[in-house]
Structure formats: structure tokens, C-alpha cells
Image (cartoon, grey):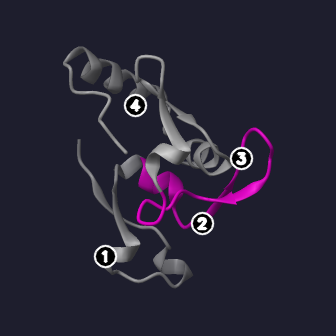
Amino acid sequence: MTFEFEHIFPLAAGGATEFENLCLACPFCNRHKSDHQTASDPLTGELVPLFHPQQQTWGEHFAWQGEGSELLGLTPVGRATIALLQMNRPQLVHIRRLWIELGEHPPEIE
């Protein structure tokens, strides 16, 4: 898979190109995020900040559901991030299933 650098706090909103504001993202997730900093929690409708991978712990907001092919949001931040970035779109779920069969997924994330 190809990844690209994502500005966590978007350049368009005054974010800087510095380590603390960068993470790796798949191009499709990056395009869905665009310049968003918040999204609606699909469960409550509440507007919440998106997950910040440099400041928050993945396991507090996300878990692998079932055999590991789909992401589950554990918090409003997790659910909103999954929804906005479309992290369970069919293509990703399919490739995760292939990775599971190869013993390459899910990753061990803390």
C-alpha cells in the first residue's frame, strides 16, 4: 500500500509542516479528510475533533471488529474519524481480509 504524509492540523487552517503535525495516511483517507478537523459522531450526531495520532492512543478510540477486517469506533472521536475517512469502505475491508488470510493483519497496535 502507498502512504502519503498527512497534515493533522491542515495547512489551510494554519497547520505547519513539522513532525508533530504529520502522520502517514492512505491517499483515499487523506482525500476524505481534506481540511476537516472535526466530524459528526454517527451515533450521537455530536461534532467532535478527529483522532490525533500524535497526541492520542489508537487503542483508546479504535478496535478491530470480528476477525479484524473492520474498524470499530470506541469513542465519539473514533466513530467520527472512521465515518469521515470512510475507513471501512468495501475496498479496505476486502484487502484486510486478504491480509488476514496471509497472517499479516491485524497489526499489534497499542
> Callout 2, which amino acid?
Gln
Camera-side residue of 72 and 84: 72
> Three-letter amino acid code at disc 4?
Leu
Upstream in sequence: badge 1 or badge 2: 1
Residue 79, by quadrant, is top right
Relative to 98, is 48 on the left or the right? right
User: Residue visible at 21% across and 20% down?
Assistant: 103
Residue 13 lies, in percent from the top left, at 56, 80
Measuring 40% from the left and 31% from the top, which residue is drawn there? 92
Q: Amino acid at mark 3?
A: Asp
Residue 106 at least partly seen: yes
Is residue 93 inside the magenta stretch? no
Q: Quadrant of residue 75?
A: top right
Q: Nearer the viewer, mark 4 or mark 1?
A: 1
Vertical placement of residue 104 versus 86, above or below: above
Disc assigned to residue 19: 1
Q: 10 Å neighbourhood of mark 1: few (<14), some, or many (≥20)?
A: few
Residue nearer the viewer, 44 or 4: 44
Circle 2 crowding by C-alpha within 10 Å: few under 14, some 14–19, many from 20: some
Residue at image mark 2:
37
Q: CA distance from mark 3 to mark 1?
A: 28 Å
Q: Where does residue 94 sit, x and y in percent of width and height?
A: 37, 21
Q: Secondary structure at mark 1?
A: helix
Residue drawn 23% across the image and 41% down it? 1
Element at label 4:
helix
Residue under numbered circle 3: 41
* Mark with earlier residue (4, 3): 3
Tell me which segment is drawn in magenta.
29-56
